[in-house]
């Protein structure tokens, strides 16, 4: 019995020793990784095992990304490079040749003066989910730049374009991103295109963005929102606030059956009888920013909430339409009766073919032979 107790104690001691060795080894590996992270961390950045943040406003060019290779940061989860002047990042993998960050889920390159990228730039980011490209100066984008990023959940392109480019050039860039893509964006829930001075959007632009749930188009210059049939079939929230839309189309409701929320606030809404068809649909759904959803015209309804308007000018029209229809119907009835009587009289006239009534002087006395 004493021998078995001794054996058990020895086993416990050995297990404890192995556990300590494991902890020491793990601590050493973590320390080495941290040292590697520190040694490979760009001078203007703050680095840890999982995160890198670079917010130096003096940063220029894209070389800041090259030290962030997966060999040095194998567990890297998020990268923020903001405030500098990166310029063009086309024609190359952002993190260097053959670099693939399989754990990186967040990339924030907002406010970085990016002017150009293409379908090679983000090829090393297969796990990317949150992508912030807002507040840049895009002048050119290659075809299908997000073809490698099949897990994107949120994409922010607000204020992304350079002031130098035209409306037509913006349409080309957006078409290259979404209309000409092999990525059907099945996981993309939120797309932000706010404050880009967009005057028109191609009807087929979002047809390949098949998983989109929320579309943000606030702060543009749109006068109408049009789209092809069978597009945006999963959309649940549409933000059209602060545009130039006077008469939103009821097709928005009719063609997007999944739509639940809409924001048309701060638009110059024209509250006439035609608007009631859209309002009827709107009243059954959730309307965001209702207090700021007001009429701009006619002047008698200016700044009045669309939900408080009692007279959209439809009554006057209906009063005229009914009498006109009634009079037209009566006139048509009278005309038809006259035509009917005329035809009836013609049919009642006696008519015998080959017979002519003779006068008295023309009578002939019958003769018998």
Image (tube, grey):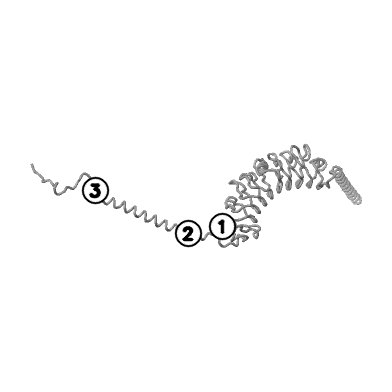
Given residues 313 and 155, the one toward you in this image is 313
Q: Secondary structure at mark 3?
A: loop
**In the rendered image, which residue does mark 2 sit on?**
320
Whole-Å distance between the Cαs marked 2 and 3?
A: 50 Å
Task: Tell me the quarter of the picture where residue 141 sits.
Answer: top right
Crowd band around label 2 with a 10 angstrom C-alpha radius: few (<14), some (14–19), many (20+): few
**Image mark for residue 78:** none
Where residue 148 sits in the image (x, y, percent)?
71, 41
Q: Are marks 1 and 3 in contact (CB under 8 Å)?
A: no
Whole-Å distance between the Cαs marked 1 and 3?
A: 64 Å
As drawn, is 135 to the left or to the right of 263? right
Question: What residue is at 37 percent from the left and 56 percent from the top?
Answer: 334
**In the rendered image, which residue does mark 1 sit on?**
272
Q: Are marks 2 and 3 in contact (CB under 8 Å)?
A: no
Residue lying furthest front in this view?
299
Image quadrant containing the C terminus: top left
Task: Tell me the quarter of the picture where residue 299 sits.
Answer: bottom right
Q: Are marks 1 and 2 in contact (CB under 8 Å)?
A: no
Question: What residue is at 29 percent from the left and 52 percent from the top?
Answer: 345
As drawn, is 321 to the left or to the right of 121? left
Given residues 70 and 222, the one toward you in this image is 222
Whole-Å distance between the Cαs marked 1 and 2?
A: 17 Å
Where residue 252 sits in the image (x, y, percent)?
59, 51
**In the rendered image, which residue does mark 3 sit on?**
351
Q: Secondary structure at mark 2?
A: helix
- Answer whether residue 113 is visible to the viewer in this image: yes
Question: What residue is at 61 percent from the left and 56 percent from the top?
Answer: 269
- Mark nearest the camera among 2 and 3 is 2
Question: What residue is at 47 percent from the left and 59 percent from the top?
Answer: 320
């Amino acid at each position: 019995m004493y021998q078995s107790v001794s054996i058990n104690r020895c086993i416990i001691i050995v297990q404890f020793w192995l556990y300590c060795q494991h902890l020491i080894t793990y601590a050493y590996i973590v320390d080495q990784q941290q040292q590697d992270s520190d040694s490979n961390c760009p001078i203007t950045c703050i680095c840890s095992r999982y995160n890198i943040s670079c917010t130096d406003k003096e940063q220029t060019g894209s070389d800041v990304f090259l030290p962030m290779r997966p060999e040095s940061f194998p567990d890297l989860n998020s990268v923020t490079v903001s405030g500098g002047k990166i310029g063009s990042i086309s024609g190359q993998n952002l993190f260097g040749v053959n670099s693939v960050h399989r754990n990186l889920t967040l990339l924030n390159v907002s406010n970085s003066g990016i002017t150009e990228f293409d379908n090679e730039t983000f090829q090393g980011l297969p796990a990317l989910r949150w992508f912030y490209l807002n507040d840049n100066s895009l002048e050119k984008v290659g075809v299908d730049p997000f073809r490698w990023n099949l897990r994107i959940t949120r994409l922010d392109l607000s204020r992304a374009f350079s002031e130098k480019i035209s409306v037509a050039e913006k349409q080309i860039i957006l078409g290259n991103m979404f209309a000409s893509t092999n990525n059907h964006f099945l996981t993309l829930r939120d797309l932000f295109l706010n404050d880009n001075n967009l005057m028109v959007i191609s009807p087929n632009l979002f047809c390949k963005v098949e998983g989109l749930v929320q579309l943000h188009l606030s702060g543009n210059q749109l006068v109408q929102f049009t789209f092809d049939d069978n597009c945006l079939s999963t959309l649940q929230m549409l933000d059209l606030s602060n545009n130039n839309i006077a008469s939103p189309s009821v097709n928005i409701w009719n063609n997007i059956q999944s739509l639940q929320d809409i924001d048309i606030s701060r638009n110059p809404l024209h509250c006439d009888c035609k608007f009631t068809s859209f309002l009827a649909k709107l009243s059954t759904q959730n309307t965001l920013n209702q207090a700021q959803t007001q009429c701009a015209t006619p002047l008698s309804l200016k700044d009045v909430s669309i939900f408080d308007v009692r007279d959209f000018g439809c009554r006057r029209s209906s009063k005229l339409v009914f009498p006109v229809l009634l009079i037209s119907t009566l006139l048509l009835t009278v005309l038809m009766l006259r035509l009917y009587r005329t035809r009836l009289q013609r049919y009642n006239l006696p008519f015998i073919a080959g017979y002519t009534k003779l006068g008295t002087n023309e009578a002939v006395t019958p003769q018998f032979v």
